[in-house]
């Protein structure tokens, strides 16, 4: 039976039908890679915490409380009780704050985080462009995560998120879910996948907004003092994009990092370092933007 199926496949592949099937599949895949849906909001949900992950071109694997954003299955790779605080200073005064706690207990792990995106000083004008004052943007998210070791090589995780967005005097609330897995076929190789921002369309004033649903896959490989990372992601309102990064452990206390983003409009390179001392890890990332938008500085402390 197996030989028959192989023979049929080879016959189809060598026929006009096989060529047509391949061409249609490739055309559909190419169109999907470059597709963008309209009506998508909540762009702030795409802003990652963790200086380490950002300095690796958004291609890193997290096993601390920031896994609640990156991939909840990463909580299952954590150790004991961990606390994380991340501060990001973007251009135009935009700030991103993250505080999270995770706890590993046997084959299970739990996580809780509070995060927010804030910006003030936007000018409020009427139809005649008269200045009426200023307003701000305040977005909050509470995330609860659970992960489990299904085996020594395979982990699953879930993040449930409650979100709140306020622009001027308009606001709304909603909820979203993330699912993720991690697989280690070899001790030094991690494979990961995540589906994020699944949930209802929140109503903002008179319009319904699509959450930025996406899938992300990645791989990390460690060899001696080096860590190599690569990732792909596809948000429904963006083309297929990727990132890659490398980390070098200079000594037990200091690591140097660099990353590169592929097919992003305003981002390419990122740099950073990490310092470990007496149970604390301090990470920093620098991310410049193109189009003269400035840069971002990201600071993370993990205990």
Image: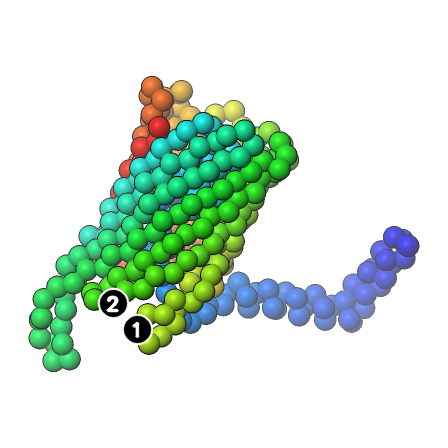
Q: Is residue 90 left or right of residue 194?
A: left
SS at mark 2 in the image: strand
Residue name at image x 29 percent, y 50 percent: 116
Q: From this view, report whether residue 174 is shown above or below residue 146.
A: below
The answer to which quarter of the image holds residue 92 is bottom left
- The C terminus: image quadrant: top left
Q: Is residue 36 left or right of residue 136?
A: right
Query: Which of the marked residues, 2 or 1, is nearer the chain's N terminus?
Result: 2
> Between 107 and 241, which is closer to the camera in this rendering?
107
What is the x, y in percent for residue 97? 28, 45
Q: Residue furthest bottom?
A: 128
The answer to which quarter of the image holds residue 114 is top left
Q: Residues within 10 Å of mark 1 (few under 14, many from 20)?
A: few
What is the x, y in percent for residue 159? 46, 48
Read off the residue under disc 2: 170
Q: From this view, report whether residue 255 is shown above or below residue 126.
A: above
Residue name at image x 61 percent, y 68 percent: 27
What is the x, y in percent for residue 131? 8, 71
Q: Is residue 179 left or right of residue 166?
A: right
Examine the rendering and report whether any part of residue 77 can be seen: yes
The disc label shown at residue 190, or none: none
Q: Residues within 10 Å of mark 2 (few under 14, many from 20)?
A: few
- The N terminus: image quadrant: bottom right
Circle 2/circle 1 CB separation < 8 Å: yes
Read off the residue under disc 1: 205
Q: From this view, report whether residue 286 is shown above or below residue 225.
A: below
Residue name at image x 40 percent, y 47 percent: 143
Residue name at image x 27 percent, y 42 percent: 87
């Amino acid at each position: 039976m197996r030989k028959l199926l192989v023979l049929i496949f080879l016959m189809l592949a060598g026929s006009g039908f096989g060529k047509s099937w391949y061409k249609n599949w490739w055309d559909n895949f190419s169109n999907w890679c470059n597709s963008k849906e309209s009506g998508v909001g909540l762009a702030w949900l795409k802003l990652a915490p963790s200086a380490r992950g950002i300095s690796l071109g958004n291609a890193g694997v997290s096993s601390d409380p920031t896994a609640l954003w990156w991939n909840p299955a990463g909580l299952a790779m954590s150790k004991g009780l961990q606390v994380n605080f991340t501060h990001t200073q973007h251009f135009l005064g935009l700030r991103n704050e993250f505080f999270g706690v995770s706890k590993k207990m046997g084959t299970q792990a739990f996580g809780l985080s509070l995060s927010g995106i804030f910006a003030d000083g936007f000018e409020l004008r009427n139809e005649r462009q008269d200045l009426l004052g200023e307003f701000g943007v305040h977005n909050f998210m509470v995330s609860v995560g659970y992960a489990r070791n299904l085996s020594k090589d395979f982990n699953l995780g879930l993040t449930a998120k409650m979100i709140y967005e306020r622009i001027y005097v308009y606001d709304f609330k909603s909820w979203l879910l993330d699912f993720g897995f991690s697989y280690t076929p070899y001790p030094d190789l991690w494979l990961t996948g995540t589906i994020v921002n699944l949930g209802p369309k929140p109503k903002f004033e008179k319009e319904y907004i699509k959450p930025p649903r996406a899938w992300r896959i990645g791989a990390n490989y460690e060899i001696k003092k080096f860590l190599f990372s690569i990732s792909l992601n596809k948000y429904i309102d963006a083309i297929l994009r990727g990132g890659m990064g490398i980390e070098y452990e200079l000594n037990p206390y200091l690591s140097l990092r660099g990353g590169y983003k592929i097919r992003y409009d305003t981002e390419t390179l990122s740099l950073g370092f990490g310092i470990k001392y007496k149970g604390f890890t301090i990470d920093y990332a620098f991310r410049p933007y193109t189009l003269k938008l400035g840069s971002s500085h990201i600071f993370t402390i993990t205990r």
